[in-house]
Image (spheres, helix red, strand yellow):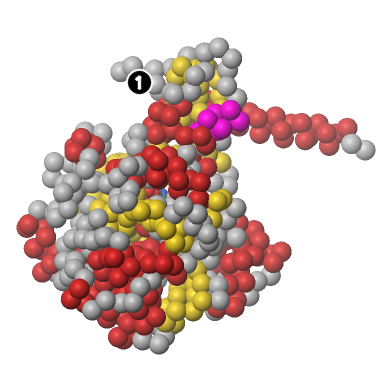
Amino acid sequence: MLTGSLPWPEPFAARYRSAAYWLDESFWDMLCGWAERHGERIALVDGAQRWSYQQLQRRAASLAAGLHSIGIGPQQRVVVQLPNGVEFVALCFALFRLGAIPVMALPAHRHGDIGHLCRHSGAVAYVTAARHGRHDNRPMTSEVRRLCPGLRHTIIAGGDPGEHMAFADLYHDSLPDASLPPPPAAGAVALFQLSGGTTGSPKLIPRTHADYAYSIRASADICQLDADTIYLAVLPVAHNFPLSSPGILGVLHAGGRVVMAQSGDPELAFELIARERVTITAMVPPLALMWMEQVAALQPDLSSLRLLQVGGAKLSEEAARRVPALLGCRLQQVFGMAEGLVCYTRHDDPAELVYASQGRPISPDDEIRIVDDDDAELPAGSVGHLLTRGPYTIRGYFDAPEHNARAFTADGFYRTGDLVRQLPSGHLVVEGRAKDLINRGGDKVAAEEIENLLLGHPAIVDVALVAMPDPFLGERSCAFVIARGLPPDLAGIKRFLRDCGVAEFKLPDRLELLPAFAHTSVGKVSKKALRELIAAKLEAEQAGVAEAAAAARQVLP
Ligand code: AMP
Ligand code: DBH
């Protein structure tokens, strides 16, 4: 086991193996099986590129040879930040072959985020694309290199690599199996997912081949994927949802086809759905709202689409009910977390549950506890803290003993930080959150991370970042600031944070200056009071707008 990651206690591991949740296979073994079974069928579509299963395996083997030649080997970490495309998949499987561990960075991450991931994971290499949309990643890559002396390789895909290594040069002639290290054991860590976080610095989530593969196989089953499935990847594929719930890995497991989209932009996505006859896709609630808004204007041909998965943040019941009529497909709600537990509404669930719940867990061995603030179990149907333990939920973050002591109970339950209620059917309804983060339409912002950075701003004495309601994203972030000297403005603090190298989605959406913060009885800043303050202010502003509009109507002829 990788130093710094925590295995399941043996009695649990034995049970998960004997129930055949955990199989004795790595993702590399799985890819070899798929290539044998589905050979010439198309696995991946990325623009004009169409890769068969065999091609994918050959490309991954050839990359593994190249990575081996630069010294990448078992258990070494490689931060991967690639756009949705064939290279992402080939690289992941090449790393799986070597037993090296991809760290799943997101395209939106910037040098501060990436630098942290490289240092915390002890990465030896960082792979990114020359550009993500309009953003040139090469200067950022040089900055990351400067910040992380442990990085031996910085590798650029798709474009002039400048001072870095070219990804394309890593495709070598495949080596005989015996000249590579043996493929990893199923119990080894396969990849690091990122936690949405609640602490000052994002945590790494070690997922093993066996546990991750189980969640994927079971998800593919629940979602009834088969060789006719055509999945449109619109969310960044490194994210746990489009990667594994059942995501691109689930689709490959089923022998289906993945169509890569660079974004969820309706015009682009609708065209791909029509052209490639897409049957399923997965998205966050704001994107689902945007698609529903655009169908009337764009009149797309969505006749092939059978299932829309929505997750990452809560979908309102009202929006959920509109999905089938507007998009002509079924809805599935997905409530999941990169730490493990994933819940789905099922195909044969009554409509009420599909619209008004966030689904029930994948596995009969997912243990759910709903507790009060003192960890005491609550009566059935009460809203409380969701704790969970099971065959694909981690027992600890990587190399974070102090945080683990808080984030897990003594008997190994993960404290999700979500407030839920369980229905008699076992389905969960997400009612709120106890953790200190802002869920910006599926993009999670850890308040403490941004607060810590802002405390370094010369004009800021104290700061509290809280969620404020937003009709489109569900929540946006508001920074309450106690200033010194000339008070900062929103543009100024955004500029400051950009210079720190944090992703754009983490920047506050609004700034409010206060002379002091209200405190709780134990002397902590009362975020509840601040959330209420900004919610009331927004409401007053909206009422003001409505009043002004009414007044304007009155004076108009
Ligand atoms: P992460 O830890 O970044 O993987 O984010 C997982 C968190 O996203 C969960 O703990 C929830 O707070 C939130 N989440 C995911 N899916 C849903 C959903 N369908 N409804 C409400 N919250 C969700
Ligand atoms: O938000 C998430 O992290 C998430 C949502 C849906 C997730 O990790 C998943 C499904 O697997």
Is 453 above or below relative to 241? above
Q: Is residue 8 magenta?
A: no
| Residue at image coords 52%, 13% | 484
Q: Which residues are magenta?
A: 491-497
Q: Position of residue 103 (x, y in %)?
A: 33, 54
Q: What number of labels is visible?
A: 1
Q: Viewer-proximal residue, 234 or 79? A: 79
Q: Position of residue 61 (x, y in %)?
A: 31, 74
Q: Viewer-proximal residue, 531 or 175? A: 175
**Corner quadrant of residue 226:** bottom left
Which of the image's four quarters has the C terminus? top right
**Corner quadrant of residue 445:** top left
Residue farthest toward the left in the current orientation of the protein: 11
Pointer 1: what residue?
524
Q: What amino acid is at disc 1?
A: Lys
Q: Quick one: label 1, few (<14), some, or many (20+) residues within 10 Å?
A: few
User: Quick one: SS at disc 1?
Assistant: loop
Q: Position of residue 230 (x, y in %)?
A: 47, 76
Mostly what secondary structure, the magenta segment? Answer: helix
